[in-house]
Amino acid sequence: MSRGLSRWFAALALVACQREPEVMKETQADPFAVVAAIDTRASSYKDPLPPTTSPPPGMNPRTPRPAINATEVHLSGRTRVEAVDRLFFRVPVEWVAAPADAGAGFVLPGPGGEARLDITRFATAGVEPTAYVRQWRSQFMTEAGAPLADEQVRVQEMVRGPLEVTLADMAGTYAAPVGPDAKERYNDPNYRMMAAIVEYRGETYLFTAVGPALTMAIWEHAFADFAASFAPQLPW
Protein backbone atom coordinates (compact mmCIF):
# COMPACT_ATOMS: atom_id res chain seq x y z
CA MET A 1 0.00 0.00 0.00
CA SER A 2 1.38 3.44 -0.93
CA ARG A 3 2.21 5.99 1.76
CA GLY A 4 -0.51 8.33 0.43
CA LEU A 5 -3.16 5.61 0.57
CA SER A 6 -2.12 4.69 4.13
CA ARG A 7 -2.49 8.31 5.19
CA TRP A 8 -5.96 8.40 3.60
CA PHE A 9 -7.14 5.36 5.61
CA ALA A 10 -5.68 6.85 8.82
CA ALA A 11 -7.53 10.12 8.21
CA LEU A 12 -10.77 8.26 7.58
CA ALA A 13 -10.42 6.35 10.87
CA LEU A 14 -9.73 9.59 12.77
CA VAL A 15 -12.85 11.28 11.37
CA ALA A 16 -15.03 8.25 12.22
CA CYS A 17 -13.84 8.30 15.83
CA GLN A 18 -14.33 12.04 16.30
CA ARG A 19 -17.91 12.32 15.05
CA GLU A 20 -20.89 10.20 15.96
CA PRO A 21 -22.32 9.61 13.41
CA GLU A 22 -20.14 10.58 10.41
CA VAL A 23 -21.85 11.44 7.11
CA MET A 24 -19.88 10.34 4.09
CA LYS A 25 -21.89 10.18 0.86
CA GLU A 26 -25.23 9.40 -0.74
CA THR A 27 -26.10 6.45 -2.96
CA GLN A 28 -29.20 5.16 -4.69
CA ALA A 29 -31.02 2.29 -3.00
CA ASP A 30 -34.50 0.78 -2.97
CA PRO A 31 -35.90 1.05 0.57
CA PHE A 32 -38.52 -1.59 -0.26
CA ALA A 33 -35.97 -4.22 -1.26
CA VAL A 34 -36.17 -6.45 1.81
CA VAL A 35 -33.02 -8.40 2.42
CA ALA A 36 -33.97 -12.06 1.95
CA ALA A 37 -31.73 -13.22 4.79
CA ILE A 38 -33.59 -11.09 7.32
CA ASP A 39 -36.99 -12.41 8.33
CA THR A 40 -38.19 -10.52 11.38
CA ARG A 41 -41.66 -12.01 10.99
CA ALA A 42 -40.58 -15.45 12.15
CA SER A 43 -38.63 -16.44 15.21
CA SER A 44 -38.11 -19.44 17.44
CA TYR A 45 -37.16 -17.16 20.33
CA LYS A 46 -38.67 -17.99 23.70
CA ASP A 47 -37.87 -15.72 26.62
CA PRO A 48 -36.74 -17.96 29.51
CA LEU A 49 -37.71 -15.26 32.03
CA PRO A 50 -40.72 -13.34 30.68
CA PRO A 51 -41.87 -10.35 32.73
CA THR A 52 -44.61 -11.17 35.21
CA THR A 53 -46.21 -7.76 35.23
CA SER A 54 -45.92 -4.51 33.34
CA PRO A 55 -45.72 -1.91 34.66
CA PRO A 56 -44.49 -3.15 38.06
CA PRO A 57 -46.42 -2.23 41.21
CA GLY A 58 -45.71 1.32 42.34
CA MET A 59 -44.96 2.55 38.83
CA ASN A 60 -47.29 5.42 37.95
CA PRO A 61 -47.78 5.87 34.20
CA ARG A 62 -48.07 9.40 32.87
CA THR A 63 -50.39 10.93 30.27
CA PRO A 64 -49.61 9.72 26.73
CA ARG A 65 -47.24 12.02 24.88
CA PRO A 66 -48.66 13.92 21.88
CA ALA A 67 -47.25 13.32 18.41
CA ILE A 68 -44.27 15.49 17.52
CA ASN A 69 -44.05 16.95 14.01
CA ALA A 70 -46.38 14.43 12.40
CA THR A 71 -45.72 14.66 8.67
CA GLU A 72 -46.10 12.65 5.48
CA VAL A 73 -42.80 11.28 4.22
CA HIS A 74 -41.99 10.54 0.59
CA LEU A 75 -39.29 7.87 0.59
CA SER A 76 -36.55 8.85 -1.84
CA GLY A 77 -34.75 5.53 -1.82
CA ARG A 78 -31.42 7.29 -1.24
CA THR A 79 -29.05 6.32 1.55
CA ARG A 80 -25.89 7.72 3.07
CA VAL A 81 -22.99 6.10 4.90
CA GLU A 82 -22.67 6.82 8.62
CA ALA A 83 -20.15 5.65 11.21
CA VAL A 84 -20.04 5.24 14.97
CA ASP A 85 -16.51 4.57 16.14
CA ARG A 86 -15.29 1.96 13.66
CA LEU A 87 -18.68 0.56 12.71
CA PHE A 88 -20.13 1.69 9.38
CA PHE A 89 -23.71 1.41 8.12
CA ARG A 90 -26.20 2.98 5.70
CA VAL A 91 -29.29 4.95 6.66
CA PRO A 92 -32.04 6.61 4.59
CA VAL A 93 -31.27 10.25 3.84
CA GLU A 94 -34.56 11.13 5.55
CA TRP A 95 -33.17 10.05 8.92
CA VAL A 96 -31.86 13.20 10.62
CA ALA A 97 -28.81 12.99 12.88
CA ALA A 98 -29.81 13.83 16.45
CA PRO A 99 -28.43 16.99 18.07
CA ALA A 100 -25.11 16.50 19.84
CA ASP A 101 -26.64 17.14 23.27
CA ALA A 102 -29.18 14.36 22.66
CA GLY A 103 -26.52 11.68 22.19
CA ALA A 104 -25.72 9.63 19.10
CA GLY A 105 -28.76 8.66 17.08
CA PHE A 106 -31.30 9.73 14.50
CA VAL A 107 -34.78 11.23 14.30
CA LEU A 108 -37.15 9.27 12.05
CA PRO A 109 -39.95 11.43 10.60
CA GLY A 110 -43.38 10.04 9.86
CA PRO A 111 -47.17 10.47 9.85
CA GLY A 112 -47.54 9.26 13.44
CA GLY A 113 -45.01 11.76 14.74
CA GLU A 114 -41.24 11.59 15.11
CA ALA A 115 -39.55 8.38 16.26
CA ARG A 116 -36.07 8.22 17.74
CA LEU A 117 -33.20 5.80 17.08
CA ASP A 118 -30.64 5.82 19.89
CA ILE A 119 -27.14 4.34 19.66
CA THR A 120 -25.35 2.95 22.70
CA ARG A 121 -21.90 1.37 22.74
CA PHE A 122 -20.43 -0.99 25.33
CA ALA A 123 -16.70 -1.71 25.27
CA THR A 124 -17.04 -4.90 27.29
CA ALA A 125 -18.73 -8.17 26.43
CA GLY A 126 -20.55 -10.64 28.66
CA VAL A 127 -24.20 -9.61 28.27
CA GLU A 128 -26.25 -11.99 26.16
CA PRO A 129 -28.52 -10.42 23.52
CA THR A 130 -31.50 -12.15 25.17
CA ALA A 131 -30.93 -10.00 28.26
CA TYR A 132 -31.35 -6.81 26.22
CA VAL A 133 -34.44 -8.23 24.51
CA ARG A 134 -35.91 -9.19 27.89
CA GLN A 135 -35.35 -5.67 29.20
CA TRP A 136 -36.98 -4.09 26.14
CA ARG A 137 -39.86 -6.52 26.33
CA SER A 138 -40.59 -5.46 29.91
CA GLN A 139 -41.00 -1.89 28.64
CA PHE A 140 -44.07 -2.80 26.59
CA MET A 141 -47.51 -4.07 27.56
CA THR A 142 -50.71 -4.93 25.74
CA GLU A 143 -53.74 -2.63 25.59
CA ALA A 144 -55.18 -4.58 28.53
CA GLY A 145 -52.03 -3.96 30.60
CA ALA A 146 -50.66 -7.53 30.30
CA PRO A 147 -47.06 -8.47 29.42
CA LEU A 148 -46.33 -9.18 25.76
CA ALA A 149 -46.74 -12.81 24.74
CA ASP A 150 -43.93 -14.75 23.06
CA GLU A 151 -45.55 -14.42 19.64
CA GLN A 152 -45.66 -10.63 20.04
CA VAL A 153 -41.86 -10.36 20.24
CA ARG A 154 -40.02 -11.08 17.01
CA VAL A 155 -36.33 -11.92 17.24
CA GLN A 156 -33.99 -12.81 14.41
CA GLU A 157 -30.28 -13.64 14.53
CA MET A 158 -27.92 -13.28 11.58
CA VAL A 159 -24.23 -13.02 10.76
CA ARG A 160 -22.78 -10.16 8.73
CA GLY A 161 -19.21 -11.24 7.99
CA PRO A 162 -17.38 -11.00 11.35
CA LEU A 163 -20.40 -9.34 13.03
CA GLU A 164 -23.14 -11.08 15.00
CA VAL A 165 -26.43 -9.20 14.71
CA THR A 166 -29.65 -9.76 16.67
CA LEU A 167 -32.84 -8.00 15.60
CA ALA A 168 -35.85 -7.42 17.84
CA ASP A 169 -39.29 -6.11 16.92
CA MET A 170 -42.19 -5.52 19.32
CA ALA A 171 -45.19 -3.22 19.72
CA GLY A 172 -47.82 -2.21 22.27
CA THR A 173 -48.10 0.43 24.96
CA TYR A 174 -44.64 1.82 25.66
CA ALA A 175 -44.15 1.86 29.45
CA ALA A 176 -40.42 2.36 29.99
CA PRO A 177 -39.28 4.41 33.03
CA VAL A 178 -39.01 8.10 32.15
CA GLY A 179 -35.48 8.12 33.56
CA PRO A 180 -32.94 6.01 35.45
CA ASP A 181 -34.47 4.70 38.71
CA ALA A 182 -37.66 6.70 38.04
CA LYS A 183 -40.96 5.38 39.39
CA GLU A 184 -42.94 7.20 36.74
CA ARG A 185 -43.33 5.44 33.41
CA TYR A 186 -44.32 6.46 29.94
CA ASN A 187 -47.82 5.51 28.87
CA ASP A 188 -47.68 5.69 25.07
CA PRO A 189 -50.17 3.40 23.29
CA ASN A 190 -49.57 2.15 19.75
CA TYR A 191 -45.79 2.38 19.96
CA ARG A 192 -43.26 0.09 18.35
CA MET A 193 -39.61 -0.75 18.82
CA MET A 194 -37.23 -2.07 16.18
CA ALA A 195 -33.75 -2.74 17.53
CA ALA A 196 -30.43 -4.21 16.43
CA ILE A 197 -27.70 -5.61 18.67
CA VAL A 198 -24.31 -5.74 16.95
CA GLU A 199 -21.48 -7.74 18.54
CA TYR A 200 -17.88 -7.83 17.38
CA ARG A 201 -14.68 -8.71 19.26
CA GLY A 202 -15.94 -7.82 22.71
CA GLU A 203 -17.76 -4.66 21.66
CA THR A 204 -21.55 -4.31 21.60
CA TYR A 205 -23.61 -1.65 19.87
CA LEU A 206 -27.32 -1.18 20.55
CA PHE A 207 -29.47 0.54 17.93
CA THR A 208 -32.96 1.05 19.38
CA ALA A 209 -35.64 2.82 17.34
CA VAL A 210 -38.81 3.61 19.30
CA GLY A 211 -41.80 5.66 18.26
CA PRO A 212 -45.41 5.73 17.06
CA ALA A 213 -46.29 2.51 15.24
CA LEU A 214 -47.63 4.46 12.23
CA THR A 215 -44.24 6.09 11.72
CA MET A 216 -42.25 2.94 12.43
CA ALA A 217 -44.28 1.01 9.84
CA ILE A 218 -43.06 3.13 6.94
CA TRP A 219 -39.45 2.48 7.97
CA GLU A 220 -39.79 -1.29 8.50
CA HIS A 221 -38.12 -2.30 5.24
CA ALA A 222 -35.55 0.48 5.47
CA PHE A 223 -34.61 -0.68 8.98
CA ALA A 224 -34.04 -4.20 7.65
CA ASP A 225 -31.73 -2.82 4.95
CA PHE A 226 -29.98 -0.67 7.57
CA ALA A 227 -29.39 -3.71 9.80
CA ALA A 228 -27.98 -5.65 6.84
CA SER A 229 -25.45 -2.92 6.03
CA PHE A 230 -23.28 -3.06 9.17
CA ALA A 231 -19.59 -3.41 8.40
CA PRO A 232 -16.50 -2.89 10.61
CA GLN A 233 -13.53 -0.85 9.53
CA LEU A 234 -10.68 -3.33 9.06
CA PRO A 235 -8.26 -3.91 10.58
CA TRP A 236 -10.19 -3.50 13.83
Image: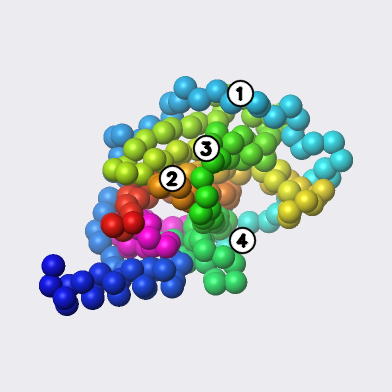
Q: Residue at x 52, y 63 (%)?
A: 104
The mark tally for this picture is 4
Q: Amino acid at mark 2?
A: Glu
Camera-nearest label, 3 or 4:
3
Question: In this rendering, is residue 14 above or below 189?
Answer: below
Q: Residue at x 67, y 40 (%)?
A: 139
Residue 48 badge: 1
Camera-nearest label, 2 or 4:
2
Residue 219 image position (x, y, % from top left): 43, 48
Q: Are marks 2 and 1 in contact (CB under 8 Å)?
A: no
Within 10 angstroms of label 2, few (less than 14), some, or many (20 or more) residues? many
Q: Is residue 155 left or right of residue 230?
A: right
Q: Residue at x 36, y 44 (%)?
A: 163
If you read the primary sequence from the N terminus, does the residue marked by circle 1 or circle 4 appear first?
Answer: 1
Residue 170 image position (x, y, % from top left): 56, 36
If you read the primary sequence from the N terminus, does the residue marked by circle 3 or circle 4 appear first?
Answer: 4
Camera-nearest label, 2 or 1:
2
Q: Which residue is mark 3?
A: 129
| Distance in Å between CA atoms under marks 2 and 4 | 33 Å
Element at label 2? strand
| Distance in Å between CA atoms under marks 1 and 4 | 36 Å
Q: Quadrant of residue 85?
A: bottom left
Residue 68 badge: 4
Extreme residue in the left direction: 2
| Distance in Å between CA atoms under marks 2 and 3 | 9 Å
Residue 199 badge: 2
Element at label 1? loop
Question: In this rendering, is residue 195 above or below 180?
Answer: above
Q: Which of the pair 136/73 is nearer the observer? A: 136
Residue 133 badge: none
Question: Is residue 28 in sight in this rendering?
Answer: yes
